[in-house]
Amino acid sequence: MNSLQGVSDRENYFVSLNRAEAIDPRRILRTLAYDHPLFDLAALRAQPHLPRLNALAADTTRTFFAGSYFRYGFHEDALLSAVQLSTQLLGCDPWAQFAVAEPEAAAAPLVAVA
Ligand SMILES: Cc1cc2nc3c(=O)[nH]c(=O)nc-3n(C[C@H](O)[C@H](O)[C@H](O)COP(=O)(O)OP(=O)(O)OC[C@H]3O[C@@H](n4cnc5c(N)ncnc54)[C@H](O)[C@@H]3O)c2cc1C
């Protein structure tokens, strides 16, 4: 947590998901219970319609839907939904302004094998 969150430069803090029994209980600051989200059938059936909700609402609101629930529930799904929404709102690829020209390919060395 020190390098990820910058919590302290004097003492090391860790988050552990496994082998809690291997940790001295006196050193545990907090125990949290998390569940991975699970999609039921209704949620899976609704997913293909989510982008249309944003499209239909575009002229009537400045509040839109984005999140990992647009796909499988992981970080990249949340990001992808935001990129897709940005594309819809901006009318163009939001990454386009950051695109850098590909460097010219270096001439391949000539290799002769006899
Ligand atoms: C235990 C656990 C482990 C995970 N491990 C991984 C992993 O290893 N890799 C991975 O890719 N993904 C993992 N995930 C999934 C990952 O956390 C999610 O994909 C990601 O956080 C989803 O981002 P999001 O922006 O869609 O939603 P969230 O990160 O849930 O953000 C939604 C935000 O909206 C806020 N909010 C909710 N309702 C309101 C409201 N009415 N008004 C204002 N704000 C509101 C919430 O407080 C929250 O901050 C894990 C999830 C859990 C629970």
Image: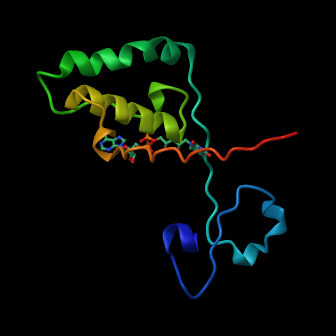
Q: Residue at x 34, y 19 (%)?
A: 51
- Counting from the top left corner in percent of width and height, residue 110 is at 69, 44
**On the rendered structure, is 63 left or right of 46?**
left
Q: Is residue 21 left or right of residue 53?
A: right
Question: In the rendered image, which quarter is residue 78 located in?
Answer: top left
The image quadrant where one finds the N terminus is: bottom right
Q: Nearer the viewer, residue 53 or 43?
A: 53
Across and down, in percent, residue 91 comes to 21, 27
* Residue lying at 36% horizontally and 35% vertically, measured from the top left: 82
Q: Decide which of 90, 50 is in the foreground and name it.
A: 90
Q: Residue reaching furthest left?
A: 60
Q: Is residue 57 above or below residue 106?
A: above
Above-or-below relation of 41 to 101? above
Q: Relative to residue 104, is residue 88 depicted above or below?
A: above
- Residue 94, by quadrant, is top left
Q: In the image, is residue 68 above or below residue 60? A: below
Instruction: Identify the residue at horizontal 56%, vertical 74% (top origin).
Output: 2
Model colouring:
rainbow
Quarter of the view holding residue 95:
top left
Q: Does 64 sit left or right of 13 as displayed?
A: left
Quarter of the image with the C terminus is top right
Q: Is residue 36 left or right of residue 87?
A: right
Which residue appears farthest toward the right when viewing the image? 114
**How many marks on residues?**
0
Q: Which x, y percent locates residue 79?
A: 43, 39
Q: Nearer the viewer, residue 18 or 60?
A: 60
Residue drawn 71% across the image and 55% down it: 17
Q: Position of residue 63 (x, y in %)?
A: 21, 33
- In this rendered view, identify the residue nearer to me: 110 or 31: 110
